[in-house]
Amino acid sequence: MEHYHMNLNLKVWRQKNNQSKGEFKLYRVENISSEMSFLEMFDVLNEQLIRDGEDPVTFDHDCREGICGACSMYINGKPHGPWQANTTCQLHMRAFKDGDTIVVEPWRANAFPVIKDLMVDRSAFDRIIQAGGYISVNTGNAVDGNALPIEKDKADSSFAAAMCIGCGACVAACKNSSAMLFLSAKVSHLALLPQGAPERKSRVMNMVAQMDKEGFGACTNTGACEATCPKEISISNIARLNQEYLMASLTAE
Amino acid sequence: MLNAKIPAGPLESKWTDYKGHCKLVNPANKRKLEVIIVGTGLAGASAAASLGELGYKVKAFCFQDSPRRAHSIAAQGGINAAKNYQNDGDSVFRLFYDTIKGGDYRAREANVHRLAEVSANIIDQCVAQGVPFAREYGGLLSNRSFGGTQVQRTFYAAGQTGQQLLIGAYQALERQVALGNVKMYSRHEMLEIVKIDGKARGIIARDLVSGKLERHFGHAVLLCSGGYGNVFYLSTNAMGSNVTAAWKAHKQGALFGNPCFTQIHPTCIPVSGDHQSKLTLMSESLRNDGRIWVPKKQNDTRKATDIPEDERDYYLERRYPAFGNLVPRDVASRAAKERCDAGYGVGSSKQAVYLDYASAIERYGRTEANKQGKSNASMEEIIAMGKEVVKEKYGNLFDMYEKITGENPYEVPMRIYPAVHYTMGGLWVDYELQTTVPGLYALGEANFSDHGANRLGASALMQGLADGYFVIPYTIGNYLADEIYSNAIATDHPAFAEAEKAVNDRIHQLMNIKGKQTVESFHKRLGKIMWDKCGMARNEQGLKQAIAEIQALKKEFWSDVRIPGEIEQMNPELDKANRVADFIELGELMCIDALNRNESCGGHFREESQTEEGEALRDDANFMYVAAWEFKGEHQWELHKETLNYDVIKPSQRNYK
Ligand SMILES: Cc1cc2nc3c(=O)[nH]c(=O)nc-3n(C[C@H](O)[C@H](O)[C@H](O)COP(=O)(O)OP(=O)(O)OC[C@H]3O[C@@H](n4cnc5c(N)ncnc54)[C@H](O)[C@@H]3O)c2cc1C
Ligand code: SF4
Ligand code: FES
């Protein structure tokens, strides 16, 4: 792989806190290596800002391996930037070239208020899980792990849904700020397993109710969520969610 | 003075006996007892969920925006359990034995045996929670093997085992939050332990969004705050992983056990330049199928694929025929360093070796061709089928490698090099996981307990969940049973006020330095000292130098660090400064510990103590103890020794040849 260096113009959303109004600010970073990650490029910017006596840009990140779901930048009009099936932290600078201007914003959704700069509050996702995204089994109650065989394809599909990292890119990509992909991933993960069966109905009803309460929008099936999801969570999960919901409402007393 | 409180009786029945005789707290009293849990990774989330289910009033803290993002999420390869589902001769005893041996005889027999005993329950619990482990076509759980063992006992979910286990524990935790048994404080950082009459009674935490300090009372405090590998700046740990919680406890009287025991993982993506902010692990499970080699010629600049088979040195297979590529991590890491130092390294930095999948792809391709009855499949077809199999097993790891390096590992061998990965050292705890401060416990990677001088792969997840789901629910009762008469202490108690003032003063002191150098630059310099002089190989002279350099760095930090922004706002630079200040102090203690331990064992390699073939040489006569350090004042520690007794296993020189 050939490596190169580049100079870039950054247009970054700055917002002091939840109350204040934000605005874009322009910055220039130079001599950026194509081997850097996007967040390492931001590290360079921040070191520069600190030395210049300015406030560095605040953003969420932790694992920098694409698995914790913390990083969340809206880059040139796309959550997590230009690469397919990718998180911001795993985007590397070889995606850009010398002289590029890169626009970076936070996730924008009513249910995800900005905390500072590029950092938003995604605690609504935790509350959706609290509403029913679990299997009620206390520690110590379990039977032997092999007591209940599960068809491999079911287990695999369940795993595919369970891979969701709770990043919220699906919400940020959706023009309605719907959280349906996130929610459907959890409902599918648990509904596909026999262990999840006893709470199947209450789970889907309660989680959907919580989602509505949090102020996420309705799903109009545009598919923007699936296209942007770093873990390629399939939109077919939303179909399953709708089915589960319908079944639960029909049989609710 | 150090009492590990190991129950009497035969090893196999210690835990059962303990559980049968420990004190219990009745349900009505549990509701009156408050427990603080710092950290909600595997250890903390499982503890919080389990204690909440039991009826205790739990307050849990993490610095991320959600408990689901704890560093445990990044664990890739798997979790061990003595299930013997594969009928390949595994048992509780064998898992116990492998862990003690893998740890190079520097762990406590009783703790490790308990760990092996509860390992099977962990898998059951996780399956019941809906953790989608990998399965075979018959619907039963699948296993793989990991370094340092000869049985298949590792359960996994592709390369995302930690994620799936943590999501399971997180969901159990959120269920308790919904039920009102656990109150969760995300984006909070614990900055001090509050002690009253010698007992841990609460914490001071900073709300990272508002920047305000808060006081929280608890009848007991559990630290589940993870490991401190980031003292090296570059490690495979998440960016936020830090030692602060454990360090504050240490300064309040909790002894720190074996601080120098660090695990350097053999298979990580090499450093690409000065900008590097962290290193990425390529799961150890890759060593199951991948072969590690370097060219036989020094400074060979040919492309890997241009180097013919007989000009490659598969040095692990050559040096350790019995275990080959599956030797324990410490052995594999040192062997890679040895080759690179001798001039056989590859890639532009020459600090890398190859991890090659070509032969695995071919082998799997042939098996697949057989399965599908294609006896005259062409080589191309075989390779294509083999790639599919490898993709199913390791796809996400291969993708990650490609994203980071821009190279396609299905076509060219991966370049790997050892990196700091895990810390076996941590807060000293007794059999009950209690530190030397009454009421203060440490679980998971934050304690020193089960892995001795080297941890075997897939054992940290096991330990974290063992501690949280199956150990602490019993052992904490033994302490809290005597606390039912203590009412909750109001947080206007002078001890809380004093602790808060100390934290506040320190933060103001840091902010007022207004120097010239960034926090990051200090952290980098600390990391370099640690990696060069307290890393994969250590010697007396280097360690002495390192201690002097770290002391100087500390002075410089406290007189020239620049922290922008304000205190009462979201200020990640201030958060980082708090952590780096503690890392600097810890770094000094690690070097002191490494200097004291003039033997090689596990991940700790003292150049002065090696065999003629360059293998680590233990000194059981002088060092068969846990080094537990007591903080005495700036740059001052006192060593306490916990002698290790091997009643069941007879220590021998490890041999993987
Ligand atoms: C890349 C990678 C892969 C790994 N793969 C494996 C594997 O395959 N198998 C295996 O067994 N092990 C593996 N490990 C090791 C294993 O993941 C860890 O040892 C384990 O997850 C640690 O869990 P924990 O609960 O102790 O701590 P962590 O998961 O690190 O959690 C720490 C918690 O403490 C909180 N915290 C810390 N300080 C504070 C503070 N001051 N105030 C408030 N909260 C605080 C954090 O917010 C977090 O919630 C891997 C490690 C790495 C780095
Ligand atoms: S569904 Fe995809 S985009 Fe949405 S939160 Fe999960 S991982 Fe992120
Ligand atoms: S920082 Fe963890 S997914 Fe990006």
Image (cartoon, coloured by chain):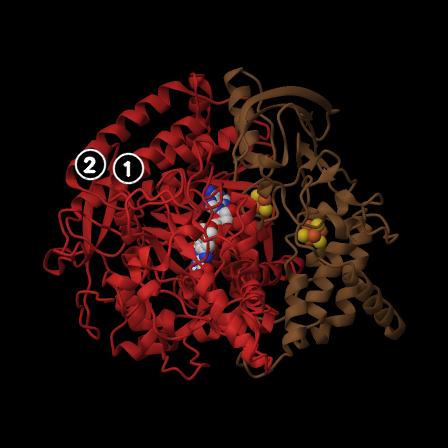
At a point 26% along the width and 41% down the height, the residue shown is: B534
- B213, above or below B1, in the image: above
Which is nearer the eye, B432 or B409? B409
Q: Earlier in the sequence, mark 1 or mark 2?
A: 1
| Quadrant assignment for the C terminus of chain B | bottom left
Q: Amino acid at mark 1?
A: Asp
The hue of chain A in the figure is brown
Report which residue position mark 1 lands on.
Answer: B532
**Pointer 2 chain:** B
At a point 56% along the width and 70% down the height, the residue shown is: B378
Whether pointer 1 and pointer 2 mark residues with C-beta atoms closer than 8 Å, the reply is yes
Q: How far from the left and from the top, in percent, is residue B196?
A: 38, 45
- A218, above or below B29, in the image: above
Q: How far from the left and from the top, in percent, is residue A188?
A: 72, 66
Total marks in image: 2
At a point 75% along the width and 35% down the height, the residue shown is: A77
Q: How far from the left and from the top, in percent, is residue B39?
A: 49, 50
Q: Say yes or no: labels 1 and 2 on the same chain.
A: yes
Q: How far from the left and from the top, in percent, is residue B537?
A: 24, 45
Instruction: Indicate the secondary structure of the residue bearing disc 2.
Output: helix
| Quadrant assignment for the N terminus of chain B | bottom left
Q: Is residue B499 visible?
A: yes
- A252, above or below A237, in the image: below
The hue of chain B in the figure is red
